[in-house]
Amino acid sequence: MTHSALGTARRADARHNVARILRAAVTCLGRDPAASMNDIAREAGVGRVTVYAHYPSREALVEAAMVHVLAEGDEVLATVDLTGDPRDGLRALIEAGWMLLAQSTSVLEAALAALPPGRVQDLHAGPEQRIHDLVRRGQALGVFRTDLPARWLASVLHHLLHGAVADVAAGRLDPADAPRYLSAVTLAAYGATGA
């Protein structure tokens, strides 16, 4: 094998290991937000040295797992049709967003515990921008209230989603009811007209 071919094979192996480690991190953190680097290495079928070669700390790996989950979620949210009535778009985003959030709650919990204050919110900038843009359009069309800033209204939905996750975890809310409740409360908070 030539030096060039060997280098290409090593890079391919490294990419494969990174993908395995990320999948293992999402799986392990999904089961236990306090999962260790050892747990993740074992799940990935690689040694700790390999994990640390790609992620120098648990915080770096937790952040990478959160970025991975958000990127997958963004692909799903990007398919939601937001071109029609903003109220319908909001309901569709809540439905899709709830399913994604319910699947990644433990990864989010790990990120909140491991990352510096504000970092998780920074990572959510893309999904929050999608909601912000929808709210602005709803305000321009006169179906959402205009006495409060769109950024604040988008933040309200973010907090409601995370509150619903906490209520589901505490047994106070049936997960099947969450999207309907979230839509009703959010539309009321947005002062949706003609809903």
Image (cartoon, rainbow, N blue to C red):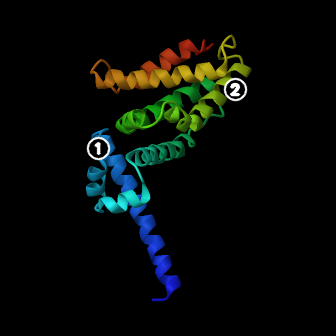
Picture coordinates of residue 28 (x, y %)?
30, 46
At label 2, the amino acid type is Arg
Q: Earlier in the sequence, mark 2 or mark 1?
A: 1
Residue 48, quarter of picture: bottom left
Q: Residue at x 32, y 48 (%)?
A: 27
SS class, disc 1: loop
**Nearer the observer, 180 or 128:** 128
Residue 87: assigned label: none
Q: Residue at x 69, y 19 (%)?
A: 139
Q: Residue at x 52, y 26 (%)?
A: 91
Picture coordinates of residue 71 (x, y %)?
51, 46
SS class, disc 2: helix
Q: Is residue 77 above or below residue 23?
A: above
Q: Which residue is mark 1?
A: 35
User: Mark 2 against mark 1, which lies toward the viewer?
Assistant: 1
Residue 137: assigned label: 2
Picture coordinates of residue 34 (x, y %)?
30, 39
Q: Is residue 98 visible?
A: yes
Q: Is residue 1 above or below residue 125?
A: below
Q: Residues within 10 Å of mark 1 (few under 14, many from 20)?
A: some
Q: Quadrant of the N terminus?
A: bottom left
Q: Residue at x 50, y 83 (%)?
A: 5
Q: Quadrant of the C terminus?
A: top right
Residue 78, quarter of picture: top right
Picture coordinates of residue 111 (x, y %)?
41, 37
Q: Residues within 10 Å of mark 2 (few under 14, many from 20)?
A: some
Q: Is residue 184 above or below residue 131?
A: above
At label 1, the amino acid type is Ala
**Nearer the observer, 88 or 135:** 135
**Nearer the observer, 47 or 77:** 47
